[in-house]
Image (spheres, rainbow, N blue to C red):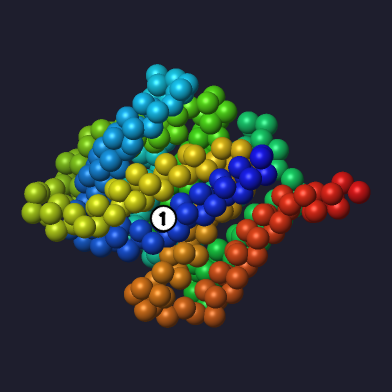
Amino acid sequence: MEKNNSLRNSFLLLLTAIIWGTSFVAQAAGMEYVGPFTFSVVRYILGGLVLIPVICFIRKRQENPADLKLSIKHGIVCGIILTVASNFQQLAMLRASTGKAGFITALYIILVPVIGIFFRKKTSPLIWVCVVLALVGLYFLCIGRGNSYSFEISDVQLLACSAMFSIHILYIDHANEKGVDGVVMSSTQFLTAAVISMIFVYPVDAGIYGMAPSFELIKNAFPSLCYSGFMACGVAYTLQIVGQKDVNPTIASLIMSLESVVSAISGFLILHQKMSVDEVIGCVIMFAAIILVELSKSPVFMKKRSI
């Protein structure tokens, strides 16, 4: 039963990566009309509100629902972390190339096990090998051999984003150990992020970037906001919280890093963007790393390793 739960949760994390990967186009399109904090406020409100009917439906049918106050408490903390992580990413994407943004953001696959050491989260040597393998794949996918690299202020923002997403993943693992209601926690984190982001709309979007929000601009960006709010937030982040149960946070970060692969493939299939040889190599290496992680959990592999 535990093995089935692990496979199911790994599949949920894969779905999370697929939704996040395909939502990049919507995120980029929406920010042509509204500023980064305005985008965050609207999409998090949509993501939080859409889950409320789901919460009511599920909790009415549960004999022993999880502690509501505890779930809300952890959701608020998660929302604060998510606010910092996502808005650093939004700000950086105003300047950074998509390849550089994808690579630096996904560095959480190495930060999660490193930070996890301080929280006594064990990571096997094989998983460390897979982490390094995935990093190599990310480099080929997002940057490539023929591209020069220059350090900019947006890189600092993306590094901060990656660090906060690492803490977000580890905190969700901690909250799941306390037995929280994943959907309640997810809805709470979105509404918390929306409220905090709202504080910065006029000082940053209007004051610094000259992108004061208006009903007309939000209306133009609404299709993108709906996909980002309902799917990337309401569905994907909830799948992340539920999927991380019984899954090592380092393995979870590896699976979710496939977001970069999905983004490249969806761009090729949907937007007819060309994929370079480096991008194909990166996709293959990253898929190999994830498959190796999943194979390492099989009973046959575990038996051979114990001999």
On the image, the x and y values in percent for residue 203 come to 19, 40
Q: Observer-nearest residue: 154 or 217?
A: 217
Circle 1 — which element? Answer: helix
Q: Is residue 204 left or right of residue 174?
A: left
**Does 7 sit above or below residue 48?**
below
Q: Is residue 111 visible?
A: no
Identity of the residue drawn at 55% across and 75% down: 280
Which image quarter: residue 267?
A: bottom left
> How many numbered discs?
1
**Does 265 sit above or below residue 220?**
below
What amino acid is found at the position of numbered circle 1 in the picture? Trp
Q: Observer-nearest residue: 208 or 165?
A: 165
Q: Is residue 135 visible?
A: yes
Which quadrant is the N terminus positioned in? top right
Provide the residue designation for mark 1.
20
On the image, the x and y values in percent for residue 63 come to 46, 22
User: Label 1: few (<14), some or many (≥20) within 10 Å?
Assistant: many
Q: Is residue 302 left or right of residue 45?
A: right
Instruction: Kindly give the residue lying farthest to the right in the view shown.
Output: 307
Identity of the residue drawn at 52% across and 54% down: 14
Identity of the residue drawn at 48% across and 44% down: 240
